Image (tube, rainbow, N blue to C red):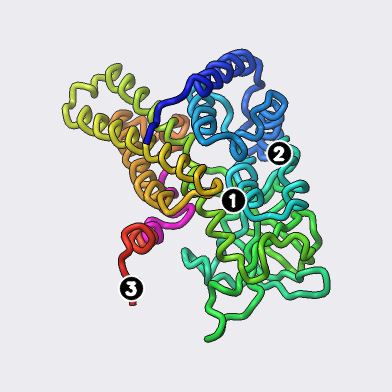
Amino acid sequence: MDLTYTEEEESFRAGLRDWLADVLPGLPARPSPDDWPGRRAYDTGWQRMLYDAGYGEVHWDAAPALRLIFLEETEKAGAPYVGANFVGLLHAGPTIAAEGTPEQRARWLPPVLRGDEVWCQGFSEPDAGSDLAALRTRALRDGDCYVVSGSKIWTSHAEVADWCELLVRTRPVSADAPKHRGITWLALPMDAAGITVRPLRTLTGTAEFAEVFLDEVRVPVANRVGAENDGWRVSMVTLSFERGTAFVGEVVACRRLLGELAGEARANGRWDDPALRRRLGRLSAEFTALWRLTQWNVSAAGRTGGVPGAGGSVFKLRYSHARQELYDAAAGVLGPGALDLERPWAVERLSALSYTIAAGTSQIQRTIVAERVLGLPRGR
């Protein structure tokens, strides 16, 4: 596979660099991590700037190489991350682009690209754990609506979202209907009657997740993406984006952080430790390999209609652990400063603990790799 860039792609890179150099100095200061309305306004404002400059559709409609260049250059330049737009831009939007009707794509995709609407993800449930198919939030058909009751947990950005990508059970589990076959994917308007949002404070002190309680919430059948009871397949499309392409910018960030760690170690004398130098060198090689794997996954997705395959699980599995190892190495460089939560690296180290759980645990990823990549038999 040719992973070099064409003249046209390098021209796109140069134009993007010039634009970033022009606009980034004029951006306002980032809001406090606890100011979610402020963070929403900041993140959606940045997305609108991208849209007006012609970069709004790069996550979906651009060629894979241009998408990689965009993510690489914005991260290198220190541009704002997608933030509150994460679910809409990287999960729900790509899923609707791949699985939605023309009417659904026309309704929901432009507002996400313009930064007008924010989405959250309503997949996980308190009693289901990593067994997503064991979800119990039910949706009963009543004419042109589903009546939804249940609860979700770890719902990203629910407190500021306009819409939720929601998985519900539309058919009870039975011998004739295994739990994977009775799930439906709905677009839930977060201002509907019967919704209660309760923010959850994380280890890092922020409330980017929430519990969501649904008490006979009416959702139009027109908001169903895919067929009724086919939501498991549609959700696998969502998760393939989450595992395969959503972390691309973070790989670039980790490679940048390695350079910063090396500079910090030289400044504080820890660079003299050969074990630390070997550790940073190995991590540098690992993140370089992960970047190449990212290029391969995105290119492969471009050949298969834009949906990443099982290679996303290979990436997610290794990246999750490599990121944790990176911040453990950062603690070795910082010494006692690793306990200072005023240091960004210290906060990121705490955040990294969640990566072997988010988007499917490492155990789930190993099962996917074993069965879908290596062709091993299912366990009994």
Residue at the farthest right position = 143
| Residue linked to disc 1 | 209
Between 65 and 25, the one nearer to me in the picture: 65
**Along the line of sight, which residue is nearer the eye, 235 or 158?**
235
Residue 65 location in percent, x, y?
50, 32
Q: For this view, does 5 lie left or right of residue 67?
A: left
Return the residue at label 3: 379
Sequence-first tag of 1 and 3: 1
Measured as percent of width and height from the top left, residue 24 is found at 61, 18
- Compared with 217, 80 (above or below) is above
Q: What are the residue bounds of the magenta stretch?
A: 350-365
**Residue 349: percent from the left, percent from the top?**
40, 39
SS type, badge 2? helix
Give the residue pinned by disc 2.
Answer: 37
| CA distance for labels 1 and 3 | 33 Å
Most extreme residue toward the bottom is 175
